[in-house]
Structure formats: structure tokens, C-alpha cells
Image (spheres, rainbow, N blue to C red):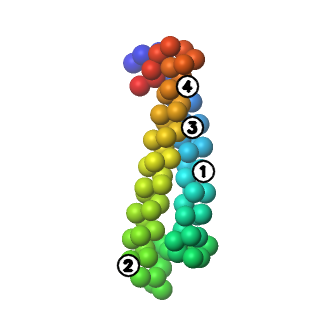
């Protein structure tokens, strides 16, 4: 394993935590707009429809995936600018 990849591990973990927090906040805001309520449905909430539960899950998954990819890419790009090597 390359030294740059090993050195990037803690940075990648920290960026992952930040992206998770940002994605969570973005999902809450998006659900407020789409669902017109504060809390998204849980899969086991018997008072919610299949449509609501699956829509919330799909939206949450998409937001988390995009946030993670954007933060990972930005971290790798910044690492290349600072060190001259790509961490992946």
C-alpha cells in the first residue's frame, strides 16, 4: 500500500464524518419540503404508507451518496494539490 494512501486514511475518515453530518442536515431540509413535515418516516412506522417510506429511503440514499462522493472527490483533489499525488 502506498504511503500517500495510508496517510490519507485519517483524512478520509474525518471527511466521511463531515459528509454524513452535512447529508443528514440536507436530507432533513429536503424532507421538510417534500413531505411537509419535520420527521421522515421510519420503515416500521405503521401509520405511514409504502410510498412515503420508500420515497424517504430513496431520497436519503441519493443525498448521502452524492454528499459522500463530493466530499471524497474534494478531499482527494485537495490532497493532490498539497502533496502532488492522488491518494487513491
The answer to which image quadrant residue 37 occupies is bottom right
> Which residue is identified by label 2?
50
* First along the sequence among labels 2 and 4: 2
Residue extending furthest toward the front: 33
User: Mark on residue 40?
Assistant: none
**In this view, the mark in front (2 or 4):** 4
Provide the residue designation for mark 3.
15
Q: Residue at x 41, y 70 (%)?
A: 55
Q: Quadrant of the N terminus?
A: top left
The answer to which of marks 1 and 2 sits earlier in the sequence is 1
- Looking at the picture, how far across and down is residue 66, in whole percent? 46, 48
Whether residue 10 can be seen here: no
Seen in the picture, residue 50 relative to 29 is either above or below; the reply is below
Asked whether the beta carbons under mark 1 and mark 4 sit within 8 Å of each other, the answer is: no
**Disc on the earlier residue, 2 or 3:** 3
Tell me the distance, in whole angstroms, between the alpha carbons under discs 3 and 1. 10 Å
Residue drawn at the location 43% of the way across and 55% of the way down = 62
Q: Secondary structure at mark 1?
A: helix
Marks 3/1 in contact by CB < 8 Å: the verdict is no
Q: Secondary structure at mark 3?
A: helix
Determine crowd level at label 1: few under 14, some 14-19, many 20+ residues with C-alpha closer than 10 A: some
User: How many callouts does the rendering have?
Assistant: 4
- The image shows residue 49 at horizontal and vertical percentages of 41, 82
Amino acid at each position: 500500500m502506498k504511503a500517500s494512501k495510508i496517510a490519507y486514511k485519517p483524512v478520509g475518515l474525518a471527511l466521511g464524518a463531515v459528509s454524513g453530518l452535512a447529508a443528514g442536515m440536507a436530507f432533513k431540509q429536503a424532507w421538510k419540503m417534500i413531505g411537509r413535515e419535520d420527521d421522515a418516516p421510519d420503515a416500521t412506522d405503521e401509520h405511514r404508507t409504502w410510498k412515503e417510506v420508500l420515497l424517504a429511503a430513496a431520497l436519503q440514499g441519493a443525498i448521502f451518496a452524492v454528499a459522500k462522493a463530493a466530499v471524497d472527490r474534494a478531499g482527494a483533489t485537495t490532497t493532490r494539490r498539497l502533496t502532488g499525488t492522488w491518494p487513491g
